[in-house]
């Protein structure tokens, strides 16, 4: 049966110790052994209370790879006493899950016994497939525990998410990884080397499973040479994978970090976040699009040249591509970070857009309408329009807003950079307007 076949994935005792990966051998068996999640499993925390009392409610474990999601599920399986069923959304089909849920529903109706259904990588089930869980969660036949590396807000359907508590796991610290590595060295009967342990912990990206897999990978070399230089050891590991995704939460987290660093006038942080994105393989065209937006949204007319620079870098990116365009993007990041800032244009447009949405039925005043035909002229299109160039200072006051609207002031220049000059210009035209009104 699917139940038994899936459950045996948790039974480490059935596997030969020679074939069990090191990460599996050292997997924590109790909450006390679990590292890196102090807040999540603190005394009286909701998750700890569930585990200690045995009173479970559906929840989602959200965290990066190797942070302990599956470990928590296994601790629950070991201690809960419930009918525990495990599925991987990568390996199992939704029909398999439905079959097991029907069996769980039968147990609930006939024996009043509830089941815990653990779905690893629950985000791999699409939204229509996730709908299948709802009736069984609502009836109480199953307690759903989902594990995901993706933001549940985007990857779990609202109806299911509203019935689950979301527990957030953090990437492990380097200190936690050092402890785990020392356990690994002891398990493999290797001589400890602080330099190697520090280097491996630093390069594991907070992933306990990864750091132990890396240790197994270099085991033959360490057995021959217990204290190599890190440069030598690095040759035995594949090139480090950047922790990044191009279309999910981390993608937006990093572009937000870049944007806010520039807004905060910090070119050093801006360069760091730019490098994080480019080195992970982000499309430079996406980055330059966001920087063009920044040039008008956050710098604007405080430095009109910012937009010119941004468009020039866009052309450089399209012309020479990566990796050569990285320095052009770096140049733009530093320019934008150090430029004077103003969001006056952004707020001005938002206010104008709000009025536009409310008053789109207002007609254009007749005197500023175009009149290319005689009929239009007969209907007074363009009548009484004054051609500004025929007057002193090239200015003649006319009302340009719809008749039903008062004249508005949307754009209010900031006090930095070129906007100080723009304010002088606005004041000049306002003076002439006041004299003619």
Image (cartoon, rainbow, N blue to C red):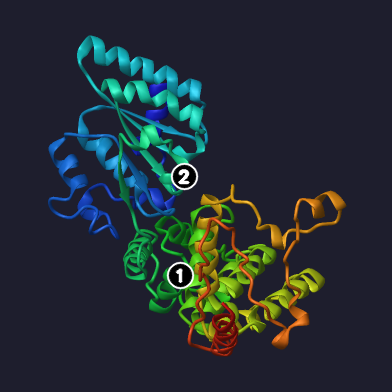
Does residue 372 appear anywhere in the picture? Answer: yes
Q: Quadrant of residue 185?
A: bottom left
Q: Quadrant of residue 338?
A: bottom right
Near-viewer residue (143 or 370) = 370
Residue, disc 1: 200
Q: Judge depth for marks 2 and 1 and give the one in front.
A: 2
Give whichever of discs 2 and 1 has the lower sequence position: 2
Does residue 141 appear anywhere in the picture? Answer: no
Above or below 417: residue 332: above
The residue carrying pointer 2 sits among few (fewer than 14), some (14 to 19) or many (20 or more) residues within 10 Å by Cα, namely few
Q: Is residue 119 left or right of residue 124?
A: left
Near-viewer residue (367 or 197) = 367
Near-viewer residue (320 or 198) = 320
Residue, disc 2: 154
The residue carrying pointer 1 sits among few (fewer than 14), some (14 to 19) or many (20 or more) residues within 10 Å by Cα, namely many
Above or below 68: residue 232: below
Q: Secondary structure at mark 1?
A: helix
Quarter placement of the C terminus: bottom right
């Amino acid at each position: 049966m699917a139940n038994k076949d899936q459950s045996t994935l948790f039974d480490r005792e059935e596997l030969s110790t020679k074939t069990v990966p090191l990460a599996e051998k050292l997997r924590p068996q109790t909450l006390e052994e679990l590292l890196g999640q102090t807040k999540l499993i603190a005394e009286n925390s909701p998750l700890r209370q569930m585990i200690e009392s045995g009173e479970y409610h559906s929840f989602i474990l959200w965290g990066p790879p190797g942070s302990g999601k599956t470990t928590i599920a296994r601790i629950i399986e070991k201690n809960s006493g419930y009918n525990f069923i495990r599925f991987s959304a990568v390996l199992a089909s939704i029909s398999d899950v439905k079959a097991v849920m029907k069996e769980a529903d039968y147990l609930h109706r006939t024996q009043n016994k509830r089941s815990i259904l653990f779905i690893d990588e629950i985000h791999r089930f699409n939204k229509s497939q996730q709908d299948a869980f709802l009736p069984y969660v609502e009836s109480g036949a199953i307690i759903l525990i989902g594990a995901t590396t993706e933001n549940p807000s985007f990857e779990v359907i609202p109806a299911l998410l509203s019935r689950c508590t979301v527990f957030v796991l953090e990437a492990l610290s380097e200190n936690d990884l050092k402890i785990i590595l020392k356990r690994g060295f002891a398990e493999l009967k290797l001589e400890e080397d602080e330099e190697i342990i520090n280097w491996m912990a630093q390069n594991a990206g907070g992933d306990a499973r990864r750091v132990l897999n890396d240790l197994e990978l270099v085991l033959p070399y360490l057995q021959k040479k217990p204290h190599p230089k890190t440069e030598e050891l690095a040759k035995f590991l594949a090139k480090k994978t950047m922790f990044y995704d191009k279309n999910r939460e981390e993608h937006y987290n990093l572009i937000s970090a870049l944007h806010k660093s520039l807004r905060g006038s910090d070119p050093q942080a801006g360069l760091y976040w730019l490098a994080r994105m480019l080195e992970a393989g982000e499309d430079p065209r996406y980055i330059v699009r966001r920087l063009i937006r920044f040039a008008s949204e956050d710098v604007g007319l405080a430095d009109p040249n910012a937009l010119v620079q941004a468009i020039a870098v866009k052309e450089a990116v399209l012309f020479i591509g990566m990796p050569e365009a990285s320095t052009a993007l770096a140049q733009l990041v530093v320019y934008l970070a150090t430029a004077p800032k103003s969001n006056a244009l952004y707020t001005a447009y938002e206010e104008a857009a709000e009025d536009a949405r409310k008053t789109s039925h207002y007609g254009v005043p007749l005197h500023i309408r175009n009149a290319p035909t005689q009929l239009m002229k007969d209907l007074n299109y363009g009548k009484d329009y004054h051609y500004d160039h025929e007057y002193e200072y090239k200015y003649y006051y006319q009302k340009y807003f719809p008749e039903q609207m008062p004249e508005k002031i949307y754009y209010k220049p900031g006090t930095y950079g070129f906007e100080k000059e723009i304010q002088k210009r606005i004041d000049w035209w306002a003076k002439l307007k006041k004299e003619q009104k």
